[in-house]
Structure formats: structure tokens, C-alpha cells
Image: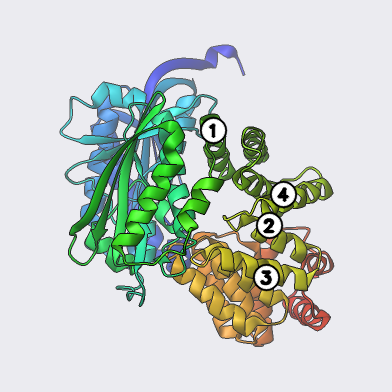
Amino acid sequence: MPEESFRHKLAAILSADVVGYSRLMSEDEVATIRTLSAYRDKISTHVHENTGRVVDFIGDNMLAEFSSALDAVDCAVKIQKTLDGSNARLAENQQMHLRIGIDLGEILIDKDVIYGDGVNIASRLEGLADPGGICVSESIYNQVHNKLAIDFVDIGTKKLKNISTPVRVYKMVGPGIEAPPSVLEETINREIALPLPKKPSLAVLPFVNLSADSKHDYFSDGLTMDIMTALVRIPGLFLISEISMFSFKSKVPSVRELGRQLGVSHVLDGGVRKEGDRIRITARLLETATGRQIWAERYDRRIDDIFAVQDEITERIVEAMDVKLVTGEVAHTIRKAIRDPDALEYYYRGWEALFGSTKDDIKEAQRMFEETMRLEPGSSFGYAMAAWAHWWSVDQGLSEDIALSLERAIELARKAEELEDFTGLSHLVMAQIHLFKREHNKALEAVQEAVLARPSCDLSYIAKANILTYLSRPTEAIDLAKFAIRLAPVYPPFFQKTLAAAYYGSGRYEEAIESAREVLTSDRNNLDAFLILAAANAALNRQEEAFKAATEVKRIKPDFSIKRYVETQPYKDPKMLEQIASMLQRAGLN
């Protein structure tokens, strides 16, 4: 194509997509298409009224360009207001909510098609927005923030996929564009109100970074994790897991609503301000039934006092909730804590990297924990986390050398145990490795140690449930998996998958199907869930449903082989493997 056909220009790019489009289509394809068609007309009208151009509208995705940032933002607000009104007239399960992202940048135009980082960034920003919400880049914010009666919330600098430079992101809030309940809140609200446990219960909200520089977010997150690590060891305390609580980082309901949703009597929140070698921490303990503040404190410390502060806060919370500590427990925690400030920085950065999804993320986590070990060779923290990072690379299929990764994970976990590891992670690592090696009794012993070390840890219980299922003890596994889910009202898909596998192992196929379907509501391409659906439906002689699930397995993994799959499943009883293989074959898999 001649070079003259390309044109460059500066433009505001608006990218939008429909939340839960696949679910809507699967539930009522005709109604969904009818609604989408009507909404397309409304959206296109707003784009044209704001002197914009619809570049593309394929399926549930829309792309538009504007010559003005102000026009793009005004259009986005009008779209969300219009759809909000239209949704109010629809049944809840037919409502269609958009996420919108907007960026300002140079684009390349080829006829009617546009290219450039601005397009890619807008698409990534859209993914950060709440259902019914709008996210904009800093370049858009600088152009419009003082010209519209809309507030913006700075949600920090984000590393966006396939974008080389991190982007500062702002979430828009204001009349008419408050987002409907997020996916998180919808998940929690399936149960009207969770009952309070019989013992004192606590949810710890992520501590807020109050520093001027958002790069210190990792520090406030790390402090939150450290506080929860200490709290999780208290047998008399019911603690909501960190997996659930970090979901509340950007949007938090009222304290009363939080207590109702999570089934807890108390909430801890606070903030961290880090400047140079000093840190100021504020913390408060709130009663969820009344919203009453029953304890608050502020701490000004040098950075090398951070763990003393952590344990001081923990001790005060325990005292306020009338939970008796084991004698000497706080002193033990302080003695084993990381004291070197540089080691602490590496530890937090490693924890942050561990939540990434790429091979480079895992390698970075391993490097950071290795530095923690080097600077604090007498602390179990670095060794335990490094062991988990090496095991995680194997579990996630990101290890370049499985044997070497396992060897290193074992070495580090054993070193952590020698240092009286109180995180319990070293036991979890060894439990998973023993299971991987078909050392079933050793796996059970290790996971029981993890549960003892972490009596309020959802991961310990779900790991034990998983191991018991492979040991042909699925009835016990069901109770443990349910308890893990209770500790984590918002939980990752593998929790429900573990429960589904336990139901299947006990012959409760209807419940296995229900749990597997629950997995797919949050992870549409979960291979294990479709395998359970295929086998369970086949066991119930529902051939059509079994075949549908098998078709999804082939879609996700075209080279799927029953023989290879069975080889990866560490069941102790070979008869269980034979039964699974037989049902998968009956479903139409080879």
C-alpha cells in the first residue's frame, strides 16, 4: 500500500466494552442482541453529537475517536447516564453495563482504521474501569479535570499490558456515573448477610498510601500483609483472608455494609505515610454493628522500627477484641522479623511481583526474596517466600527447569523451617511438592503443620482439602473447602474447583456440576471445571451435557489427551483415576 495512504493526528480515543457479554449471550442470546443493537444506536448518537467518529463496533467492543479530550469525556459521561436510565427499565439479568477507557495520543490512520499506543492504552484503561464506570489516562485528566463538574480519583500508576511506559490512571466519579455494584460486590451480595462467627472476627482493609508518591503503594500493601501474617496465627480470631480484602482496595462499602457482607464484628483500617527514613502509621478499629470507633492510634517511627510497630498494632487489636495471646508470641514475632530496611524493601517488592502472571514476574519475585535472604540470613521470611516463588513457577507452568525449581523450593523451605518459620508457607510448599511427587502421607503431614501454623488461613484449608481429595477422603475435603470459602467470601476460582473435585470424588455429581459452573462464572476458560462437568454429566448419563463440556475442553486445549491428563493427577487410589478416565472417554474425549 502506498505510504501516502497513512495519516498521523493527535486524537482522544474512547474504548468501551460490555461487562459479562458472554454470560448475557449464553442466558438469552436474542434479548442480548436486541439490547445491544438499541444501545449501539444510542452510543453512536452521542458520539456524533460530540463531533466524534465511531471507528469500530464489533460484537461488544466499541472504538471511537475525537478531536477534543473534552468531547470524548463528555460523550463517555452521556453514554453511561443514558445506559443507566435504559438499564433501569430492564430485568436485572438483562441489564447491560459498559466499561469505558479514554486516552489522548497520536494515532496512525489507514483509511478508516486507526492504530497507535493511544488505541492500546484506551483499551487497557477500559479494563480497569468498574461496570458503568470510566477510567482516563493522565493526558486526558490534565485536559479536562478543571473544566467539568466531575471528580476524579487517582488510582495510581499502572503497568499496562504491551505498553512500555507505565500510565497514571484516574477513575471518574460524579452525578450519573457512579458505577453499579462491582463484580466483587455482586459476588458477596449473593448471600444477604453472613452470620457472625461465635468467636471475635476481623476484616483488615488494605492500608492506604498517604505519601505524595504512588510508588510507595507496595509499602502500604506490604504492611497490611505483615499485620495479617501476624493475626492469622491467633487461634481465637476469625480473620477474613487477604485474597478477599485486597479486592476492596479501590472501592469500599460502609463499615456496617462490610460487616454484613463479610460476616465480621470488627474492621481495621489505616494509612501509611513514608518520607525518607521515617514512617507515620495511623490505625483504627471499628465495630461493624454500630460504626463506632473503639480504638485508634498513630505511630511515628524510623523505618527500622516497622515490625515493632506491626506487632504493637497487632497486640492492641487482640487486646481490644479480648483474644488471649499465647505467652511470648509477640516477642517471638519481633525477634524473627526483618530488621534491615533494605531487606524489607526487597521483601515487599518480591511480594508485589509474585502476584504477576508472567515468567518475568516470577523471576523478579525470586530475585527480590533472594536479596532479602542475603541481607537478613537469620530471618525465615525471605526463605519461606522464595520457596513459594520457586514452587509457584512450577505450579503455574512457568518454570524453565521443573526439577531445578523443585530442588530449590525444597532447599529454601527446609531452611525456613530450620529458622522456625512462623508464616506456615514453608509447610504449604512442602505439602504441594510432596503431592506433586505422589508422596501422599508426607503431603498430608506437611499440610497439617501448615494448618496448625496458620489457623485462620484459607490457603492452608483449601490445600488440605485438595490433598485429602487425592487421598480418597473427599467427604472431609468438602467440609474443609467450604470452611476455606467461608474465610474468603471473595475467593479465586481454584477454591470452588477444589470443592467441585471433592464433590465428584464423593459421588455427589449434581453438587460437583454446580460448583464447576460457579468456577466458570469468574474464569470462562477454566479447563479443570469443564473436565469436572464432562465427567460428572457422563456419570449421570447426561450425554448431551457431557459432550458440550468435552467440546469446551477441546476448544481450550486442542491437543488434550486423557492419558496425559491422568498422568498429572496424583490420586493415591488408581481406581479413582480409572473411573475419571472412563467418564471422560464416555463424554467424547480421547
The first of marks 3 and 1 along the sequence is 1
**Mark 1–mark 4 distance (CA, rounded to whole Å):** 19 Å
Q: Can I make out residue 543 in this image?
A: no
Q: Quadrant of residue 62?
A: top left
Q: Residue at x 67, y 33 (%)?
A: 374
Which disc is residue 497 wearing?
none
Tag 3–tag 1 contact (CB < 8 Å): no
Q: Residue at x 42, y 16 (%)?
A: 9
Q: Amino acid at mark 3?
A: Leu
Q: Is residue 53 above or below residue 537?
A: above
Question: Which quarter of the rendering shows the C terminus?
Answer: bottom right
Q: Which residue is mark 2?
A: 429
Tag 4–tag 2 contact (CB < 8 Å): no
Which disc is residue 415 wearing?
4
**Mark 4–mark 3 distance (CA, rounded to whole Å):** 38 Å
The first of marks 4 and 2 along the sequence is 4
Q: Is residue 114 above or below residue 193?
A: above
Residue 263 in percent (x, y) is at: 33, 69
Q: Which residue is mark 1?
A: 340
The first of marks 1 and 4 along the sequence is 1
**Mark 3–mark 2 distance (CA, rounded to whole Å):** 26 Å
Q: Amino acid at mark 2?
A: Val
Q: Nearer the viewer, residue 551 or 503?
A: 503
Residue 520 in percent (x, y) is at: 54, 65
The nearer-to-camera label among 4 and 2 is 4
Tag 4–tag 3 contact (CB < 8 Å): no
The first of marks 2 and 1 along the sequence is 1
**Mark 2–mark 1 distance (CA, rounded to whole Å):** 26 Å
Q: Nearer the viewer, residue 377 or 292?
A: 377
Q: Which residue is mark 3?
A: 531
**Mark 4–mark 2 distance (CA, rounded to whole Å):** 12 Å
